Image (tube, rainbow, N blue to C red):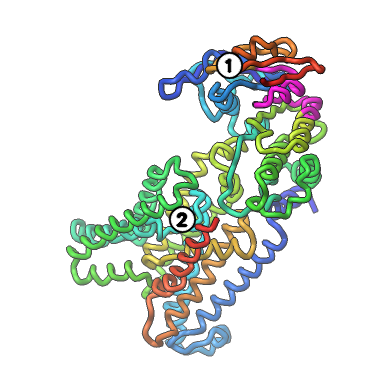
């Protein structure tokens, strides 16, 4: 089972944002997309979610075309964490996490709600925040709450093995070091329970440490796609970021100069 | 308990706290109490208990059943529809200042209604002015304004708060010109029914006028309330709501149409009554929380309750004369509006 992007191209306002992009995310795999600003990483994610319909090419979830899947069913297949959402009204943190709970009129789902809710809030270390107002939290705390909501959306009854995908756009922005580690380790744990994960990252060290595969994007194209140790080389990264970069294996470390 | 009953019970209580359920229950009681007080109070002395016991005179019964009861019911459904439409529009536009009156929706409805009264009477004198024609014209006016607002504020999101109010001023002015021209060309008889729209009043309502409005408003409430969860998710932004499985376009259309119907039907019967759609949802949020599953029914009940009381005051303050109820709601609502603006600036 896998999520595939097949030769996707997209033009916006006469600018080529994506050029013949193909990508595969297998179940249980973390794929990290890296690249300089304006490379088209977020647009790529928006095509995968179905927010944007590309000019050509296909998005395929487990051998099914995305546009053949109903909007409601898409929500059960993939969960998305985008960069930032502000809320106008003063919701409780509990309300915000609950927004990720998809109802299917299935009593099995309803009776499991409190167990699932407690599990994700504990996992994301927001269990002490649930009774506070969302707008009174710090930026990092708000991110963790949205992350908990995104995880709640992925919840399935234990006997179910429907394929699931998690797509994240710079989830570690605004997070302190410990929250960053917490989040990345949760992703790792989700991958080992067969969730396919695509994560856009800016931190090359984080990407090379946690990702099974890395896609390097520049100017709307995927310049390289493969295992971190295969594609993260001095010369190649230097040519992508246009600053001198040296890769050190410790076991694998990337340093900036 | 069977599993079906269990799942129905959990779908009612899901996403709503027991405190909120208690508030809704209390609001229900307040509404019923205010209905009874309002029916029993007025410049003509009568009592409900005597009516139930059959001790009333024939005249008392007529006053009660043909004047007092329809009037109280009208104020209740108008309050409920303005309250819930305010709550739904604020949620839809993600704008805490979206009130059907302020953003011009009520004015659009009033223009639709006056057009039918004057033009309809002048050009199609034989046209049957059925009791559904007036509400339908008002609803079309309201729908038109909301669609216009939607097109004009596209992409403005939260930054569009002030923008939307400015558009509302313009829409109110345009509708004012329209109503002004229609007033100028209208005959004496039409003029009398026109002035009533600019004031807002529950006087002179009769059952044949009331029943279509009750039907329209009840249907819109029934269609609005199941959208509560979707309105919650819309607060995360339209892309995010879509990712959580909401067909955003369909939800928007259904909310626009149902709230326009509720406002339109109210305006057709009672004229423009300002600030209810602004004040009521805020009060309801203040006492219980912001999730729409609680907010929508809460705003309907609180709106009904406050409107019955406002109408009661309009009838008894200067007995036997009447103060237009729109005057009372504006007198309470406009300082509240100012307070909200100052509070928002601090955010």
Q: Quadrant of the C terminus of chain A?
A: top right
Q: Is residue A5 left or right of residue B142?
A: right
Question: Does residue B122 appear in this view?
Answer: yes
Residue B47: x, y in percent? Answer: 53, 87
Q: Are marks 2 and 1 on the same chain?
A: no
Quarter of the rendering occupied by the N terminus of chain A = top right
Residue drawn at point x = 19 percent, y = 71 percent: B188
Q: Which mark is residue A242?
A: 1
Q: Depth check: A72 or A106 in front? A: A72
When asked about the image quadrant of residue B117, the answer is bottom left
Q: Which residue is drawn at the image coordinates 71% and 41% (left, top)?
A: A144
Q: Label 1 lies in what chain?
A: A
**Looking at this rendering, what residue extends furthest in the front direction?**
A257
Magenta-colored stretch includes residue A191: yes
Q: Does dot 2 land on a helix, a strand or a loop?
A: loop
| SS for dot 1 | loop
Span shown in magenta: A188-215
Give the answer, above or below, for where B76 lies relative to B114. Answer: below
């Amino acid at each position: 089972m896998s999520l595939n992007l097949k030769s996707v191209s997209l033009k916006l306002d006469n600018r080529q944002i994506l050029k013949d992009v193909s990508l595969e995310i297998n179940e249980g795999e973390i794929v990290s997309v890296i690249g300089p600003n304006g490379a088209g990483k977020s647009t790529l994610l928006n095509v995968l979610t179905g927010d944007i319909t590309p000019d050509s090419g296909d998005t395929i979830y487990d051998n099914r075309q995305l546009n053949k899947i109903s909007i409601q069913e898409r929500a059960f297949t993939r969960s998305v964490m985008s960069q930032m959402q502000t809320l106008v009204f003063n919701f409780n943190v509990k309300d915000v996490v609950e927004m990720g709970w998809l109802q299917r009129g299935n009593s099995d789902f309803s009776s499991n709600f409190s167990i699932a809710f407690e599990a994700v809030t504990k996992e994301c270390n927001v269990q002490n925040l649930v009774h506070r107002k969302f707008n009174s939290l710090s930026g990092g705390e708000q991110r963790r709450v949205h992350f908990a909501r995104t995880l709640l959306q992925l919840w399935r009854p234990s006997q179910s093995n429907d394929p699931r995908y998690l797509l994240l756009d710079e989830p570690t922005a605004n997070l302190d070091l410990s929250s960053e580690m917490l989040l990345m380790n949760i992703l790792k744990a989700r991958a080992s329970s067969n969730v396919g994960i695509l994560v856009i990252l800016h931190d090359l060290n984080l990407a090379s440490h946690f990702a099974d595969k890395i896609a390097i994007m520049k100017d709307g194209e995927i310049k390289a796609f493969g295992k971190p140790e295969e594609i993260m080389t001095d010369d190649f990264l230097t040519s992508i970021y246009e600053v001198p970069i040296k890769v050190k294996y410790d076991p694998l470390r990337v340093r900036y100069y | 308990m069977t599993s079906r009953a269990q799942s129905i019970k959990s779908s009612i209580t899901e996403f709503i706290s027991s405190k909120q359920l208690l508030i809704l229950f209390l609001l229900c009681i307040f509404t019923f109490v205010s209905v009874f007080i309002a029916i029993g109070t007025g410049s003509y002395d009568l009592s409900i208990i005597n009516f139930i016991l059959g001790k009333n005179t024939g005249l008392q019964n007529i006053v009660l059943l043909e004047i007092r009861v329809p009037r109280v019911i009208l104020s209740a459904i108008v309050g409920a529809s303005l309250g819930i439409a305010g709550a739904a529009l604020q949620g839809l536009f993600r704008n805490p200042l979206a009130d059907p009156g302020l953003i011009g929706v009520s004015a659009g409805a009033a223009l639709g209604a006056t057009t039918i009264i004057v033009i309809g009477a002048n050009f199609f004198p034989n046209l049957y002015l059925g009791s559904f024609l007036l509400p339908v014209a008002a609803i079309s006016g309201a729908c038109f304004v909301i669609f216009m607002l939607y097109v004009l504020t596209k992409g403005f999101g939260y930054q569009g708060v002030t923008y939307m109010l400015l558009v509302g001023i313009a829409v109110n002015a345009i509708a004012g010109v329209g109503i002004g021209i229609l007033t100028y060309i209208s005959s004496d008889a039409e003029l009398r029914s026109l002035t009533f729209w600019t004031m807002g009043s529950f006087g002179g309502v009769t059952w044949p006028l009331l029943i279509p409005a009750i039907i329209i408003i009840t249907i819109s409430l029934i269609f609005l309330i199941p959208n509560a969860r979707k309105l919650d998710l819309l607060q995360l932004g339209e892309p995010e709501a879509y990712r959580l499985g909401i067909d955003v376009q369909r939800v928007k259309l259904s909310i626009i149409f149902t709230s326009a119907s509720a406002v339109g039907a109210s305006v057709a019967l009672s004229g423009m009554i300002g600030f209810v759609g602004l004040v009521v949802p805020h009060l309801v949020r203040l006492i219980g929380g912001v999730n729409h599953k609680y907010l929508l029914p809460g705003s309907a009940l609180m709106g009904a309750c406050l409107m019955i009381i406002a109408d009661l005051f309009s009838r008894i303050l200067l007995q036997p004369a009447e103060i237009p109820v729109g005057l009372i709601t504006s007198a309470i609502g406009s300082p509240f509006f100012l307070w909200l603006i100052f509070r928002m600036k601090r955010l």
